[in-house]
Image: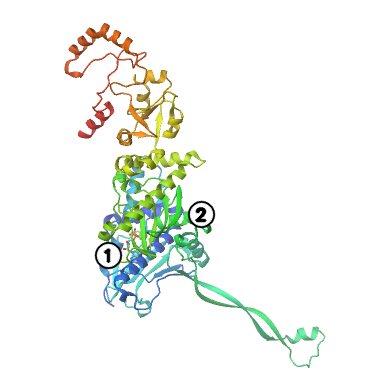
Amino acid sequence: DPPAEKFEYQAEVSRLMDLIVHSLYSNKDVFLRELISNASDALDKLRFLSVTEPGLLNDGLDLDIRVQSDKDNGIVTITDSGIGMTKQELVDCLGTIAQSGTAKFLKALKDSKDAGSDNNLIGQFGVGFYSAFLVSDKVVVSTKSPKSDKQYVWEGEANASSYLVREETDPEKMLPRGTRLTLYLKRDDKGFAHPERIEKLLKNYSQFVSFPIYTWKEKGFTKEVEVDEDPAEAKKDGGDENAEKKKKTKTVVERYWDWELTNETKPIWLRNPKEVSTDEYNEFYKMTFNEYLEPLASSHFTTEGEVEFRSVLYVPAIAPMGKDDITNPKTKNIRLYVKRVFISDDFDGELFPRYLSFVKGVVDSNDLPLNVSREILQESRIVRIMKKRLVRKAFDMILGISMSENREDYEKFWENFGKHLKLGCIEDRENHKRIAPLLRFFSSQSEDYVISLDEYVENMQPEQKDIYYIAADSVTSARSTPFLEKLTEKKYEVLYLVDPIDEVAIQNLKSYKEKNFVDISKEDLDLGDKNEEKEKEVKQEFGQTCDWIKKRLGDKVASVQISSRLSTSPCVLVSGKFGWSANMERLMKAQSL
Ligand code: ADP
Ligand code: MG
């Protein structure tokens, strides 16, 4: 035999395996989902490559996944006929963390530890290949890539700091193509090798993998066989002992083992929406995006006409971990298929603008070429039309959540993705009409829960023309500003813009339902109640006082003026009509530090 080479894991991996085994203890089941999803990814990659290299499929091998379990020995094998791995890929993919789900897992773990929370969160993260060690003492991966004429074996044990890679030489283990994982289950986890258990898990997790998954299963069929009648029986029946032996038929069960298809392979987006249940949409979501929580909403649609495509979109229940994901549109959230062939999930604003990059889903088009490249995507008229429709559907879906009887649903959405929509106010003028009704703010009359602009407008006084707002760093400081006095007296509601991005978003919108947004902290706020006579009088009386104050304050203020905007406070600092608001100024300062 050629010698096996020994490799050390990248430091984090050995630590990771230990973490996985200990922290995911309660949800070991996930291992099968992870391994099946890797098999499915490998088949997707092969199918995609075969578009330009049809020769890859010449071996006539079907694209499928086979799971076999040996309950007596506690062994489970998962075989796919996908892209496989070369020796180098084995080392790169299974010995390092790279960009995979495992890196995400480590980060999430760290974040939740930092946040001091007792990490229930962990179960939510895909842990990838290493989840095999949740249930296994030893994992053997034998794999054949079409790029190599040799087959290689990766062999690793739980809690070890190294793994082995060698060439496969056993003729019985040769694969024409693809990968076989053999899991040697831990003593306490041998139950996973029961075919019924495997089948149950597969039904749970893998219903929506778009390749057939077969399980190796014991089956039986009944059959009538002729048997000789027992002579003793015959005698009891009063028969003649010497009579010829009678023939009798009997039903027996014939047992045998065979592959059985366990999943439905028609992609969910090709099915009739009327025939798909919410549960099925949710399961598809969890399987496809490695999610643990149910989505907040989903939308399944087909568009026809100019451009034809089908899509299922989702709004996740929570925003992804990490603080600045809002500016990172590369989320792998949209999976593009062309005629059912998975093409890519690596987009950068081509299908959704970055402020909507939290939307997840699949899109299947018949109009794009199979060998579509990033350049084609960026320049394609078809893609532009698709984008427009997708965005519209995404807004419909979000509007649906906002109209749900369960107010909490939208509050949850707003808490997680409100910032994204505000960013939309700044970046997507074309969709202002769709974004504005979805915005929520605290106000002088609703300090505990956020209200919509429609609710604001409904609550306007008959003579009130504008929508008033004040930007501040918190509800408490907004509440105590003297600018509010006159408006409160007139029962005018004032929006509290307490998120740093709020003010810029509102300024970009400019108006809602033909009512302008007006900052109550700006100079010459007109509440439509000017009494010119009276003002003139007061100005004359206090003109000198103003001059005196201006002289004392010098450059600290631009001007000192008489105003009718206060009712109980003697004076207030306002910002110039064309200047930045105090809040903006504070933000700019904070940024330049
Ligand atoms: P992820 O799937 O998020 O990339 P995993 O830990 O699940 O992370 O897998 C790591 C990598 O190992 C995959 O990206 C892939 O390149 C490779 N891999 C895993 N399973 C298979 C398989 N069955 N066939 C081919 N490659 C695989
Ligand atoms: Mg994976």
The image position of residue 409, as x and y in percent, is 47, 42
Mark yes or no: residue 503 visible.
yes
Q: Residues within 10 Å of mark 1 (few under 14, many from 20)?
A: some
Colour pattern of the rendering: rainbow
- Residue that badge 2 annotates: 279
| Residue 28 visible at all | no
The label shown at residue 91 is: 1
Task: Work out which residue is located at the far top of the displayed protein and give it.
Answer: 541
Q: Is residue 296 left or right of residue 470?
A: right
- Name above or below for residue 293 compared with residue 498: below
Name the element at disc 2: helix
In the rendered view, would you say 445 is above or below 215? above
- x then y, percent, for residue 219: 55, 74
Q: Residue at x 33, y 15 (%)?
A: 564
Between 534 and 199, the one lying in front of the other is 534
Q: Which mark is residue 305?
A: none
Q: Quadrant of ligand 1?
A: bottom left
Q: Position of residue 377 (x, y in %)?
A: 29, 58
Nearest the eye: 281 or 464 = 464
Callout 2: CB less than 8 Å from ligand 2? no
Which of disc 1 and disc 2 is earlier in sequence? 1
User: Disc 2 marks which amino acid?
Assistant: Asp
Beta carbon at label 1 within 8 Å of ligand 1: no
Image quadrant containing the N terminus: bottom left
- Residue type at mark 1 is Val
